[in-house]
Image (spheres, grey):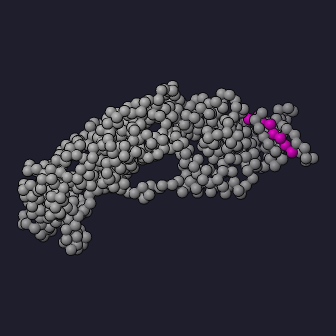
């Protein structure tokens, strides 16, 4: 078996439908701006050694082994899924032969040092103790991700140029108790990103609208939603035909031509263990077993192993609240607007303060409705110290008001004389550029920027509309919805590229174009070629020439047999090949 050349790939590209071509271009990471004139250009570019080496890491282990066998045995790849995938990716012809451009560099491609593991005995079904341990880990991971999203919503997390979490925000998450250490922080961020609850926006990690909605769902639904998305985000080589996933012991060798893959596989496995989809050995939790088979999470089985959610708390005289179990997410989210959570366990503790209540009022809460809410979820009523703190915060709230004046500038007004004088000399507020203008301060910063900086500095501030009525500002800086922030389908420019190649193919003689390309290559290399020429009497004759020139519709070369210079009309040349 001899590998087939670029012309075979060009022929396949010309015959394939547009969707198949676009899929190939995307899989091979071809720029939509590629300066290809025709399908021959495309074939040669795809089979260039550099392009083959760049694309080789996308091949899964079965595809790599199929090419290995074909090149070693000198036999074509047999019909089947492997051949179909290799043809679709431009590595092999439909007849089963790898292209010459692939064969030429195949032996030199770097291989992962990870070897395929030997078959091991299937582990027994998880025992009840195993599931109890996994359920505890699942609950901890859920709480950690919820804390990270809650912290990232108003203040996005920093993202480095390599895509990892910034060191400063990694420390912020650890100090806030959202994660245990730096490694856990990176894993939780990765889980949030793969589950589409976090999105990379420039140099920030932002909560997505789906992530914001996820925070208000029940415990089981949150875990199940994330687990489904983690499975769906797996690379193709890790998925089974039924929709599940391959055993974790097979993950490190799934992409043998990608030197970076083993490290990525290890990170993926660590994410799955942290989320308690699998245990340390890679065995799925009992509630995740249907997920591993391509189905859905067994929510009932998971619920049996998780502590039940509660919707009542104990309010105490020391301005703390104790939840006797995991609070319903919607209640927890509202409670955390007015109190700081101090302990993160199944029984959590929250602490109210003048600052935390003031922050809740600044974020749109009303003192009366907040008191009613706390009384409705309290098993101990509303303690007098907490009621007093709510009343005191309500009296202070709104002494400073931020809005727009008639000219569209941001202004700060005060209900008490002298309050603005404090703002004017506060060095922490210098970035706002507050300037006195009569009985007010004006700033070129936006209303939101001024409001939140004053709120963070613990001033009793309220945002107002053009009529002076108090309005709530949403501090959450969410990522744009997926369909608005990035295209969900192929780049439309790929379709434009395909249309251009198709037009060039339809407008010309493909055989003549290929012959001209072969002759030009031979002349540049001064190669010795065998040229088959159609003579005037209809017969054909072959000449062995050292190609020396091409122009004016004629090929020039030295005839090796007679040692004379020959000039042949290109229109009479039937074919040309290397001698």
Would residue 216 appear left or right of 397 to someone viewing this image? right
Q: Main secondary structure of the magenta part?
A: strand
Asked whether 194 or 469 is in front, the reply is 194
Q: Give the quarter of the image for residue 467.
A: bottom left
Q: Residue at x 47, y 55 (%)?
A: 487
Asked whether 474 or 101 is in front, the reply is 474
Quadrant placement of the N terminus: top right
> Residue furthest toward the right?
537
Would residue 109 appear left or right of 334 to someone viewing this image? right
Quadrant placement of the C terminus: top right
Percent position (x, y) of residue 399? 11, 64
**Residue 471 located within the stretch drawn in magenta:** no
Asked whether 89 or 270 is in front, the reply is 270
The stretch of residues the image draws in magenta is 527-534
Percent position (x, y) of residue 67? 62, 33
Asked whether 268 or 549 is in front, the reply is 268
Q: Give the quarter of the image for residue 549.
A: top right
């Amino acid at each position: 078996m001899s590998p087939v050349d670029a012309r075979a790939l060009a022929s396949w590209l010309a015959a394939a439908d547009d969707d198949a071509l676009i899929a190939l271009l995307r899989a091979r990471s071809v720029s939509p701006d590629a300066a290809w004139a025709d399908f021959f250009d495309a074939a040669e570019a795809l089979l260039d050694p550099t392009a083959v080496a760049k694309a080789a890491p996308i091949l899964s282990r079965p595809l790599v082994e199929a090419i290995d066998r074909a090149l070693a045995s000198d036999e074509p790849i047999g019909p089947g899924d492997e051949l179909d995938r290799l043809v679709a990716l431009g590595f092999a012809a439909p007849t089963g032969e790898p292209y010459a451009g692939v064969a030429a560099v195949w032996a030199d491609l770097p291989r992962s040092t990870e070897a395929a593991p030997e078959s091991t005995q299937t582990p027994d079904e998880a025992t009840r103790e195993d599931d109890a341990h996994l359920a505890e880990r699942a609950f901890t991971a859920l709480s950690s991700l919820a804390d990270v999203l809650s912290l990232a919503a108003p203040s996005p997390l920093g993202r480095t140029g390599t895509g990892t979490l910034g060191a400063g925000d990694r420390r912020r998450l650890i100090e806030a108790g959202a994660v245990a250490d730096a490694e856990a922080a990176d894993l939780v961020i990765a889980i949030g990103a793969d589950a589409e609850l976090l999105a990379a926006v420039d140099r920030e990690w932002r909560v997505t609208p789906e992530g914001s909605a996820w925070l208000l769902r029940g415990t089981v639904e949150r875990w199940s939603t994330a687990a489904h998305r983690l499975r769906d985000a797996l690379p193709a080589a890790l998925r089974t035909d039924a929709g599940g996933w391959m055993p974790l012991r097979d993950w490190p060798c799934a992409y043998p031509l990608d030197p970076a893959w083993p490290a990525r596989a290890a990170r993926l496995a660590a994410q799955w263990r942290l989320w308690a989809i699998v245990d340390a050995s890679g065995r799925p939790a009992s509630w995740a077993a249907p997920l591993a088979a391509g189905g859905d999470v067994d929510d009932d089985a998971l619920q049996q192993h998780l502590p039940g959610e509660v919707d009542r708390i104990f309010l105490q005289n020391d301005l703390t609240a104790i939840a006797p179990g995991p609070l319903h997410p919607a209640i927890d989210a509202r409670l955390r607007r007015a109190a700081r959570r101090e302990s993160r366990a199944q029984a959590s503790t929250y602490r109210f303060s003048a600052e935390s209540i003031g922050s809740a009022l600044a974020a749109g809460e009303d003192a009366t409705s907040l008191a009613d809410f706390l009384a409705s979820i309290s098993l101990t009523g509303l303690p007098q110290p907490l009621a007093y703190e709510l009343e005191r915060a309500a009296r202070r709230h709104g002494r400073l008001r931020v809005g727009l004046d008639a000219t569209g500038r941001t202004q700060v007004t005060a209900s008490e004389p002298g309050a603005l004088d404090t703002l004017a000399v506060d060095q922490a507020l210098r970035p706002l550029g507050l300037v006195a203008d009569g009985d007010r301060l004006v700033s070129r910063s936006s209303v939101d920027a001024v409001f939140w900086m004053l709120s963070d500095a613990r001033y009793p501030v309220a945002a107002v509309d053009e009529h002076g009525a108090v309005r709530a500002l949403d501090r959450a800086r969410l990522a744009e919805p997926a369909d608005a922030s990035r295209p969900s389908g192929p780049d439309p420019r790929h379709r434009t590229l395909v249309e251009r190649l198709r037009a060039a193919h339809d407008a010309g003689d493909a055989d003549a174009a290929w012959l001209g390309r072969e002759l030009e290559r031979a002349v540049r290399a001064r190669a010795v070629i065998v040229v088959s020429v159609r003579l005037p009497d209809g017969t054909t004759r072959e000449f062995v020439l050292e190609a020396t020139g091409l122009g004016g519709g004629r090929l020039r070369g030295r005839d090796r047999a007679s040692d004379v210079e020959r000039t042949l009309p290109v229109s009479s040349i039937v074919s040309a090949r290397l001698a």
